[in-house]
Image (cartoon, rainbow, N blue to C red):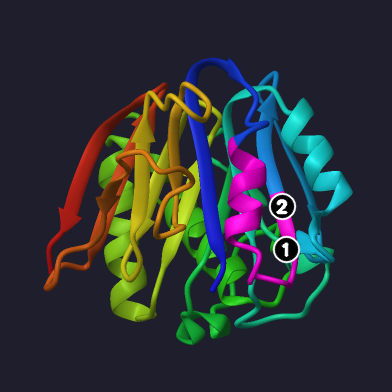
Amino acid sequence: MCDLFALSARQHHTAATSLPLFAVRGRQNVHGWGIGFFRQRVPVVEKSGEQVFADGRLHISFQRLARVVNSPIILAHIRYKTSGQVDECHAHPFILTFWGQSWIFAHNGKAPAIESYASPHTPVLKAASDSARAFEFLRDYFTDAEPRRPYTPFAVILREALDQLLRRYPGGYNFLLTNGQVIWAFTTHRQFMLLKGSEKLEDALLLTTIEEGLSSENWQRLAAPEGSLGKLLLIAGGDLVLSADLLP
């Protein structure tokens, strides 16, 4: 199954050590990869439909990006196809705009019910996958809630959107969502592993779905407890500022 990675720091950071480790440990995912970040508040995504690790070495473009991307927030995704084609279009992350900001989104999971979702808003993503439809659903919920924006916190709308997503299109969801200032993470079926203040990797907050983490340090496991709808995380700078279980 696909794997996710995020780095979050108060200042610009590279992920020259942790990103290659992420790719090596997630190398069983053979259907593409992508890295997303913000450059002067403009979202940038570079991705490929090729394997991230083959013949004993990392994809040359992934290696280059791991060295040169310098941003307070960096997301990465390594794909194992559960829906859609194997090509650059279907690789993650994706970009959409709502509430006056551009957002980068990466997802792993399996939610075939939402593949039938038809967005009433434009643009729509070209990818024919549950991940693309899930991102459009969230964008559309925020778009329809635009009149409430001046007085309703983002977190309230997001919780409502997730509740509707899970009730209308049940499935396994696991995603990262960022506007370049904060990262929202949500999981219904897998764990996030979190490490802050690493002595072996970057001195930033690191988050991944790789079960053993990316180093031999004391990674914190964050997962949805039994009986909940999922676990929602909010990361700002180098801190985990919210960890909430969504109740039925």
| Foreground of the two, 154 or 177 | 177
Q: Amino acid at mark 1?
A: Ala
**Which of 56 and 170 lies nearest the eye of the viewer?**
56
* Circle 2: element type: strand
Q: Nearer the viewer, residue 29 or 184?
A: 29
Q: Which mark is residue 119?
A: none
Q: Which residue is mark 1?
A: 91
Specify the quadrant of the image occupied by residue 78. bottom right
Mark 1: few, some, or many residues within 10 Å (few <14, many ≥20)?
many
Q: Is residue 15 magenta?
A: no
- Image: magenta residue range: 18-34
Q: Earlier in the sequence, mark 1 or mark 2?
A: 2
Left/right placement of residue 202 relative to residue 145 reads right
Q: Which kind of residue does numbered mark 2 sit on?
A: Gly
Q: Identify the residue at horizontal 25%, vertical 44% (top origin).
A: 156
In the rendered view, tell whether residue 216 sits above or below residue 81: above
Question: Looking at the rendering, which quadrant does residue 49 occupy?
Answer: bottom right
Left or right of 45? Residue 239 is left
Expressed as whole percent of the image width and height from the top left, the position of residue 123 reads: 71, 57
Of residues 46 and 144, the one nearer the viewer is 46
Q: In the image, what residue occupies the spot 41% across and 27% down?
A: 198
Image quadrant where one finds the N terminus: bottom right
User: How many marks do you count on the picture?
Assistant: 2
Q: Which residue is mark 2?
A: 34
| Residue 7 image offset from top left, x and y in percent | 52, 34
User: Mark 1 and 2 residues: CB-CB less than 8 Å, in contact?
Assistant: yes
